[in-house]
Amino acid sequence: PPPPPPPASPRRTHAAFLDEAARQGLSVLVGIPMPIEMWHLSNRRGAHASLVSWWESVLEETARDLGSHPATLGFVLMNELDDAFNAFPGAAAPNPSGTPETDFFYGSAVKYARLVKRAAPGKLVGWALHDIPQWLGFASRASPRSPDGASLVAGQTYLAQISGAFDYFGFNTYQTSPAGLQAVMGSAGGGVIAGGGLSYGAPGIADQIKPLLLTEIGWAHSGVTAGVADAGSEAGFTHAGVAAFASEEEVAQRAALVLRAAYLEHSRLMLGTFYFEFCDEWWKARSHTARDDDEDAFGLFGRRRSAGRPIEDALWIDGAGPKLPLDELVPYSLLLQARPSPHARATHS
């Protein structure tokens, strides 16, 4: 069923969280989790009209309410909905063409960025994509097939048009070396990547690239290589899984090495970093699996089970939230001390 009209829905301003962030001197980048129907044309075609209007109303309301808070740095419109069919079809072709799906995808980006900017002037707006270079190669060469004249216009590439609406480009990456990061951000070889991709540092698009936020970067120290749901789209360029290291000390060394390279070698582009993550995403752990072990090994804090519960006991009760008492946060001290830049921040899940 469609959601109730926005006035009848609970209104959450997160004021207590933002007030505490401000007291601690922290800035918050607010993620707005609009569903796939707002980004992918095939999903929109079957969506209830009230779902679309509800989310657009909530987007504007959230930007207006949270954008007025001094702790709010800006907004993330979308996270990792950049698949090949909707974001970069035929990227390897010399002259890729726009499709109805890419018109909808990039048109939504422009439309919603402008909406947020009107509701929260002075706040940053962008998105968080995978570190797949084909979208950038495609968007820098392809233009809208059927521009609507409002969100998209004729005669300009998709990249030019989203660049005019965004304040930053964000991407999530788990590169384990400066060389890997160079392939995403650097300018070597003109920034050209096999398969029609471009790096963010490619000289040919320098005037259209906004400052970069590493919206996720981090490593696990469980010794387990975690599978990722979209590994197929990334295989052959970055990773078919997220590498894990044997110890906290190894992760601390890796963080210092890779993040130092990000800030020193790519200082022209770097806006900042969000380390993945503050602590484990507990809401994922409805049952304990090997993947949960790896999830817990990410972040700046681990967890110690409370109330004598066994490790395989679920952390979360569907419909009710976390089990109480909450598990104890255990700081990863070596990693907390391995900050290579004053601009590094940690994501809070």
Image (cartoon, rainbow, N blue to C red):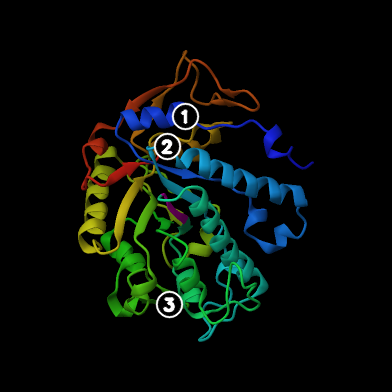
Label 3: how many Cα within 10 Å (few below 14, some 14–19, many 20+): few
* Residue 56 percent location from the top left of the image: 63, 50
In which quarter of the view is residue 193 placed?
bottom left
For residue 15, the mark is 1
Q: Is residue 319 left or right of residue 203?
A: right
On-image quarter of the C terminus: top left
* Residue 293 percent location from the top left of the image: 45, 36
How far, Cα to Cα, is label 2 from label 1?
Answer: 8 Å
Q: Nearer the viewer, residue 218 or 232?
A: 218
Q: Nearer the viewer, residue 297 or 96?
A: 96
Mark 3 or 2: in front is 2
For residue 96, the mark is none
How far, Cα to Cα, is label 3 from label 1?
Answer: 46 Å
| Residue at the bottom extreme, as displayed | 94
Amino acid type shown at disc 1: Ala
* Residue 173 percent location from the top left of the image: 40, 55
How far, Cα to Cα, is label 3 from label 2?
Answer: 43 Å
In which quarter of the view is residue 188 placed?
bottom left
For residue 69, the mark is 2
Q: Which residue is mark 3?
A: 194
Q: Nearer the viewer, residue 149 or 277?
A: 149
> Is the residue 216 above or below the residue 237 in the image?
above
The residue at the point 31 percent across, 55 percent down is 271
Label 1: how many Cα within 10 Å (few below 14, some 14–19, many 20+): few
Mark 3 or 1: in front is 1
Task: Decide which of tag 3 and tag 2 comes sooner along the chain.
Answer: 2
> Is the residue 27 above or below the residue 49 in the image?
above
Element on which disc 1 rests: helix
Label 2: how many Cα within 10 Å (few below 14, some 14–19, many 20+): some
* Residue extent of the magenta highlight: 123-127
Q: Are marks 2 and 1 in contact (CB under 8 Å)?
A: yes
* Residue 344 percent location from the top left of the image: 28, 46
